[in-house]
Amino acid sequence: MAFNVAADAYDRFMGRYSAVLTPQMADFGRVKAGQRALDVGCGPGALIAELVDRGAHASAVDPSPPFVAAARERYPDVDVRQATAEKLPFADASFDVALAQLVVHFMADPVQGIAEMARVTGDGGVVAASVWDMVGGQAPISPFWRAARELDSGVEGEARRAGAGEGQLSELFAQAGLADIEETAFPVHVEHATFEEWWKPFTLGVGPAGEYFQQLEPEQQQALEQRLRDQLGEPIALETRAWAARGTVSY
Ligand SMILES: C[S@@+](CC[C@H](N)C(=O)[O-])C[C@H]1O[C@@H](n2cnc3c(N)ncnc32)[C@H](O)[C@@H]1O
């Protein structure tokens, strides 16, 4: 499993970008103090931090044991459970809002996962999700997959994953039965002073990119690193964005 890794490795690889997305995600989900809020696919807890800061009563799920352990340790007052979106361990209408940040593209059944988020959210509540624009090549990890494909045209990357293109999340939300669906893009400016700072976390085995890197032969790893070093230079500045969809639960 691409996320059976230490929380610290995740923080260094993707957590550094998710922390920048969380205020946009919580705003878009219209999270307010006192609400019961569910973070689906919480990872080590970037979005939990935002929900707690906003005074929401947060709960969270993730299938990755090390991430659940880290989230529990970081937020001892939050109910963090090991589970998938497709089978949420909560009764109907347990929440006012359910959010999934950078998770839909990892769900085995995205429509079922989003429908489950709607089921556990009460009538009139909000369900929202975001996924990097990997179809548009505007994820912080897009340069990695571009270079990998240049070296091996058979590399799939993550652009075919659910929700990674404009309009795709809205379509999944519609299939999951949500009403009043709106889609937007969250811009994220990514800056790294050195190539090393951007690159090193790719070697830690986190997510599909990290897994891909680790199964390469040493000389292939070096070729990929060198190509990216040449292409990106330093400092690195990337204009990235995530697609986000929001819908209302209507019984
Ligand atoms: C890119 S991380 C996002 C983590 C966190 N939401 C964030 O913004 O940093 C993707 C997360 O989705 C989780 N995940 C994978 N499949 C899932 C599923 N079917 N249901 C819920 N979460 C899932 C992974 O374990 C991982 O923590």
Image: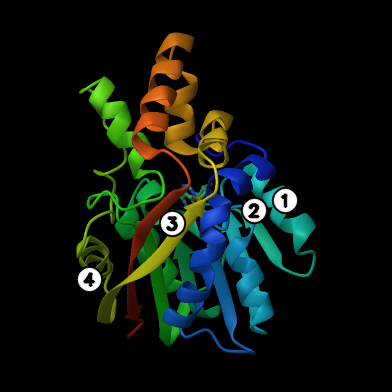
Q: Is the shortest distance between ligand 1 and the CB of mark 2 under 8 Å? A: yes
* CA separation in Å, label 3 and label 1: 18 Å
Mark 3 in CB contact with mark 4 (< 8 angstroms): no
Q: Earlier in the sequence, mark 3 or mark 4?
A: 3
Label 3, on which residue? Answer: 102
In the image: residue 29, left or right of residue 242: right
* CA separation in Å, label 3 and label 4: 19 Å
Give the x, y percent position of residue 9.
63, 40
Q: In the image, what residue occupies the spot 47% across and 78% down?
A: 121
Q: Is the shortest distance between ligand 1 and the CB of mark 3 under 8 Å? A: yes
Label 2, on which residue? Answer: 44
Label 1, on which residue? Answer: 70
> Toward which corner of the image does residue 188 lie, by quadrant?
bottom left
Label 4, on which residue? Answer: 174
Other-residue count near label 4 (Cα within 10 Å), few / some / many at <14 / 14–19 / ≥20: some
> Toward which corner of the image does residue 201 lie, by quadrant?
top right
Instruction: Determine the secondary structure under disc 3.
Output: loop
In the image: residue 85, left or right of residue 242: right
Q: Residue furthest front?
A: 234
Of the 4 image quadrants, the one containing the C terminus is bottom left
Amino acid type assigned to the residue bearing label 1 in the image: Ala
* CA separation in Å, label 3 and label 2: 13 Å
Mark 2 in CB contact with mark 1 (< 8 angstroms): yes
- Which is nearer the eye, 126 or 22? 22
Q: In the image, what residue occupies the spot 54% across and 29% down?
A: 203
Q: Earlier in the sequence, mark 4 or mark 2?
A: 2
Instruction: Determine the secondary structure under disc 2.
Output: loop
